[in-house]
Image: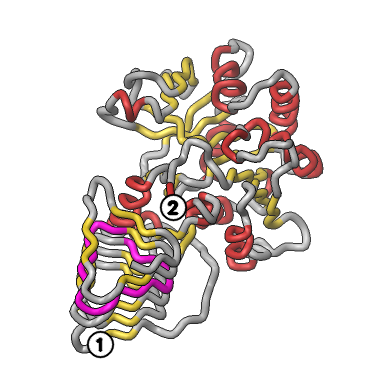
Amino acid sequence: MKNDMLGVIFSENPEASMGELTSLRSLAAVPVGGRYRIIDFMLSNMVNSGILKVGITTPVNYQSLMDHLGTGKDWDMDRKDDGLYILPPKDTGESDVEAVGGIERLAGISSFLDKSQQEYVLVTDCNTICNIDFDKVLESHLENEADFTLVCTKVKNLTPKEARKHILLNVDESDNVTDMHVYPGHQVTDLSYMHMFITRRESLMELVEYASTHGKHQISKDILLPAVLNDQVKVCAYEFNGYRKKIDSIQSFYKVNIDMLNKEVRDELFGLSVDNPIFTKIKDSVPTKYAKTAEVENSFIADGCKIEGTVRNSVLFRGVHVGKGAVIENSIIMQDAEVMENCLVENVIFDKGVILRSGKKLVGQDTYPLVIGKEIVV
């Protein structure tokens, strides 16, 4: 059963607004957690669930994503049969990647879906950070004899602004989805769709073809909602109760990284409490060097760093240099960045290769961190 499900991951999300972090890379390729990329979590979840074939749709700026994924070897997906497939965008004449909806993306990979042999297909966004067993979702799908199974999670006390970012579900005692509210103006139920669903591959292809030839764009509004409202289609829900965060803004990206400093969250996310590790591209780097003047507290420090100053409640990626007298607090510092002597950095996100000159002070807010773009010298 495990080998009878195909995975499809969307590496871009038009609803995400990540500013500088996605100006030169796809959403899926954004670094997170010291040594990972966003795509690592969903791809690892599929691999751990026994899915042997995964297709990843790519936006226009997908070079960074391809460099990271390579042949899929680090995820044990470099296989003669099945394995990892990078699916470049179909030339539709659209210059703006955000103009392309989920239905267009699925229509663009119709040949990939058609040539696949798996009976079921799992379709997900890339930007939900969680550790989930999709094999259990498939088991639930089969037990319920469902046409669609939607993965959902409980949400509480959503403001009207937050509710408009959620697709909320009404679910009865038998796990049947009785109604779907697509980005409502207020919270009408406590179950939120996580943009992950399972259905039969051939059925999905038929629905996508019909929708695309009738000018439809959104999977949730134009495929799933009509299915929920159709008495002849059985749509069920699978509730996921673990840690999950959707990275769709600078604030959510910052929150996820800071959450990883919590041991309970870290143990769950990286499979330390269960046997579901998160895989990533392996790099051979020297160990981090800590000078006698270094002070580090409650932080992620990747390999290849040189720490001479103070680091608190922060995430440092590979090759970061922190100079003497420098203080970094509540910040995310990406690969090969350098904070020179006697600097103060607080509530800040540095993209790769940023250099902060000696004596500078950068302070953001925990609710709105300051972002410094790639390879900028301050």
Residue 299, percent from left and from top = 27, 67
Task: Say which mark, if any, is on residue 16.
Answer: none
- Where's the N terminus, which quadrant? top right
Using the rendered image of the protein, determine whether residue 236 is visible from the camera's viewpoint: yes
Tell me which colouring the rendered structure shows: secondary structure
- Give the residue type that dot 2 points to: Glu
Which mark identifies residue 20?
2
Instruction: Please state the horizontal and vertical placement of residue 190, each as a whole percent of the image.
Output: 33, 25
Which amino acid, by three-letter code, is at mark 1?
Ala
Q: Give yes or no for residue 344 being in the magenta stretch.
A: yes
Mark 1 lies on a secondary structure that is loop
Residue that label 1 marks: 291
Side (left or right) of 205 relative to 61: right
Question: Is 9 left, or right, of 113 in this rendering?
Answer: left
* Front position among marks 2 and 1: 2
Circles 2 and 1 in contact, beta carbons < 8 Å: no
Q: Which residues are magenta?
A: 332-348
Q: Quadrant of residue 32?
A: bottom left
Image x and y of residue 13, in percent: 53, 40
Say if 197 sits above or below 22 in the image.
above
| Residue 63 vertical position relative to residue 151 in the rendered view, above or below | below
Packing grade of label 1 (10 A; few <14, some 14-19, many >=20) is few
Residue drawn at the location 42% of the way across and 74% of the way down = 336
Return the disc, 2 or 1, that comes first in the chain's sequence: 2
